[in-house]
Image: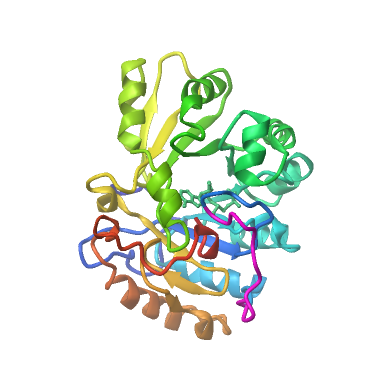
Amino acid sequence: MTIARSPDILPLAAPLQDGIGRRFEYLRLSLTEVCNFRCTYCLPDGYRKPCNRPVELSVDEIRRAVTAFAQLGLWKVRLTGGEPSLRRDFEDVARAVAAVSGIRRVAVTTNGYRLAQRAQAWRDAGISAINVSVDSLDPARFAAITGHDRLAEVLRGIEAAQAAGFDAIKLNAVLMRGVNDDELAAMVDFVRARDLSLRFIEVMRTNDNAAFFRDRHIAGQSVIDRLEAAGWHRLPRAPGAGPAVELGHPDAKGRIGIIAPYAKDFCASCNRLRLSSDGRLHLCLFGDGGSDLRPLLSTDDPQPLIAHIRGLVATKAPAHRLHDGNSGATPHLASIGG
Ligand code: SAM
């Protein structure tokens, strides 16, 4: 879908597209692979620092990268990780990204552990949308899933984000058989009564979680079926929207989205690229090790980087190979930004 843009934010280069005509508007930027939570599906033993821990991009390198992507027509950036707010310069990064010409939306995905204290500061730094991971509304379960007894604190953070006036607040919940699949109705009621949206995410298989995936994966379609039976209806895809299926209900302020990467045609609407915290461009969450952009991030001239990104994106595979049991080189989503 074409996005109407005012002349001052037209991309300076021809818009970025791959070999099958998919356009890219959305950059997911990992700020760190470090996370303080120990989610059972991602980092069950906690983050372990590897001996050759990658060096994170500096604020200047991030600004240069985002400038090149913006000139290629990307206008939305999500700060993610790991836990992005663990970076001491997190708010400086947010401000630098928000100031890049052409960037119209800066979002963050967080586990919410700092949100109650920092919501207003993040909003003031230019972040306008926030996704908070809440896999259970039951405190004991939340603690069992994340390794942290902090549900109340995270919920206070969500209230602080509402008070700070973010344009959009979403709760992310990973669906897990036998763990939280009995909470569907409670979660839907939680967002129905509040001006919040909910994202159910199918647990994705990565290199490190094959057994967990086998035991816990639930197809998102089963949730869609249950919601449709309860009066929720599918919404048309919004401009710039990614592959999530969105549903609305006449009595609900918020929406529900389902991210189902195993569903047929999931990749057809892919509109996103990922940059890891050490500057590797990943064309797919389930792809190879990515391509190092760092050597091109030392100067303020974006042209060599733009040409390089264009060449890489032209090679993007039409679809992931999850159905062949191939989840690519990603050990866990914290490593490249989920
Ligand atoms: N630390 C932040 C957080 O907790 O939201 C951001 C990073 S986290 C990797 C981003 C999102 O990916 C979270 O909503 C998390 O639940 C989700 N996630 C991580 N591993 C996943 C997996 N294997 N399958 C599905 N979702 C996953």
Q: Quadrant of residue 250?
A: top left
- Residue drawn at x 53%, y 21% as measured from the top left: 186
Q: Quadrant of residue 329?
A: bottom left
236 displayed left or right of 110 = left
Q: Position of residue 246 (x, y in %)?
A: 37, 33
Query: Quick check: can you spot residue 70?
Result: no
- Residue drawn at x 35%, y 37% as measured from the top left: 220
189 displayed left or right of 291 = right
- Residue drawn at x 47%, y 36% as measured from the top left: 199
Read off the magenta span.
42-54
Of 174 and 96, which appears nearest the observer? Answer: 174
- Up-down: is 132 above or below 183? below
Query: Quick check: can you spot residue 150?
Result: yes
Q: Residue furthest right?
A: 117
Q: Position of residue 219 (x, y in %)?
A: 33, 38
Q: Is residue 46 magenta?
A: yes
Examine the residues drawn in magenta and state their main secondary structure.
Answer: loop
Q: Position of residue 337 (x, y in %)?
A: 52, 59
- Up-down: is 277 above or below 271? below
Q: Quadrant of residue 320?
A: bottom left
Of 273 and 150, which appears nearest the observer? Answer: 150
